[in-house]
Structure formats: structure tokens, C-alpha cells
Image: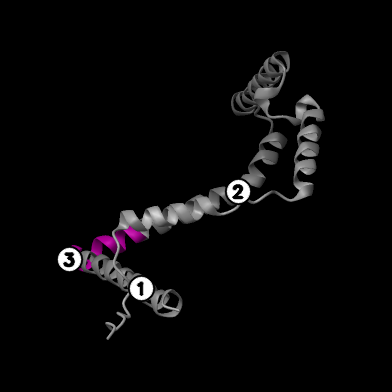
Amino acid sequence: MAAPLDPRPPTRSPESIERLIGDLLRDQPLRSAPRTLHARVLAEIERREAAPWWRHSFLHWPLAARLLFILASLGVVKLALAGVVLLISGVHSQPVVDTIAKPLSWAEASASLLSKSVNLAAVILNAIPSTWLYAAIGLAVALYLALFLLGATAYRALYVNK
């Protein structure tokens, strides 16, 4: 009489499973690229090499062009700073001041509103006992962790075990 077959799979060590999988993968035939891929790759390489030098990255520009660009950039920065200094220190004519001040009036109003809001928030926070603030922070952290755990549980229940 033959022994009954055990329905459980034989247990193997992780190393033997790793070897088995490695052997199976090594025995698979090599996959070849699509026939048109080689031609497309070579055409793209030729197209990129045929592009003018200013279409390449800055490090591939000729040295003279890089130096000229850096000097021109520094010149533009110097002119901009000189213009700002001239506007701040030397120009007191009313039309120029009005031209500059009008567009910036909204920024001044916004800064004033923000400053008053920060002062109000500081007064409110100073009125609340520190124990309540710590308890609120602890509650927020606990609720965040609960939300994370619920999401992970829902993910495992809906997607992983399928």
C-alpha cells in the first residue's frame, strides 16, 4: 500500500529557492529589441549631435561662449543694481516716485494685514493654556496615525489579498 500524498508543498531554505529562481531566469531566452529601435536610437543620436552648440547644455558650449555669457550676465546684474541704487538714492522727482509707489501700494497693505494677523494670532495663542496646546497637538498626531492605519488596513483588505 502506498503512503498518502502530503498536500503541503515541501519546505525549502531561502538559499535553495534563490538558486532555483536564478537557474530558471538564466534558462530563459534573451529578448531582442524591436527591429525599429536600433534605427530610431541611431537617428536620435545623430539628430542631437547635429544640433547647434547653443542647443546643448551649458557645459558643452565652447569656452569663449561660456565666458562671454558669464561676463554678459554679470554686466546685466551690475546694470540692474546700479539702476536700483540710482532710483533709491538719487531720484526725488514726484512722477518717478508715484510710478514706483502705485504698483507697490497693494504690497504695503498686504504686509500690514499680515503683520496684524500675526499679532492677533500671537495674542490668541498666549491666551490659551500650554497644556491645552500640547493636548491638541497630541490629538492631531493621534488622529493622523489613526488615518494612516485605516488607510493601510483598507489597502490590505481591498488590494493586497486579492
Image quadrant where one finds the N terminus: bottom left
Q: Is residue 103 above or below residue 57?
A: below
Instruction: Provide the residue span drawn in magenta.
Output: 121-132
Q: Where is residue 63 drawn, in percent x and y?
A: 69, 14
Q: Is residue 38 above or below residue 6?
A: above
What residue sits right under mark 3 in the picture? Answer: 131
Q: Is residue 81 above or below residue 138?
A: above
Dominant secondary structure of the magenta stretch? Answer: helix
Select label 2 or label 1 by which is in front. Answer: 1
Q: Amino acid at mark 2?
A: Ser
125 is within the stretch colored magenta: yes
Q: Residues within 10 Å of mark 2 (few under 14, many from 20)?
A: few
In the foreground, 64 or 60? 60
Q: Residues within 10 Å of mark 1 (few under 14, many from 20)?
A: few
Residue 35 placement, left or right of 26: right
* Numbered label attached to residue 107: none
What residue sits right under mark 2 in the picture? Answer: 105
Residue 33 placement, left or right of 126: right
Which type of secondary structure does the marked residue at label 2 adopt? helix
Q: Where is residue 113 drawn, in percent x and y?
A: 48, 56
Q: Amino acid at mark 1?
A: Leu
Select label 1 or label 3 by which is in front. Answer: 1
* Numbered label attached to residue 147: 1
Select label 2 or label 3 by which is in front. Answer: 3
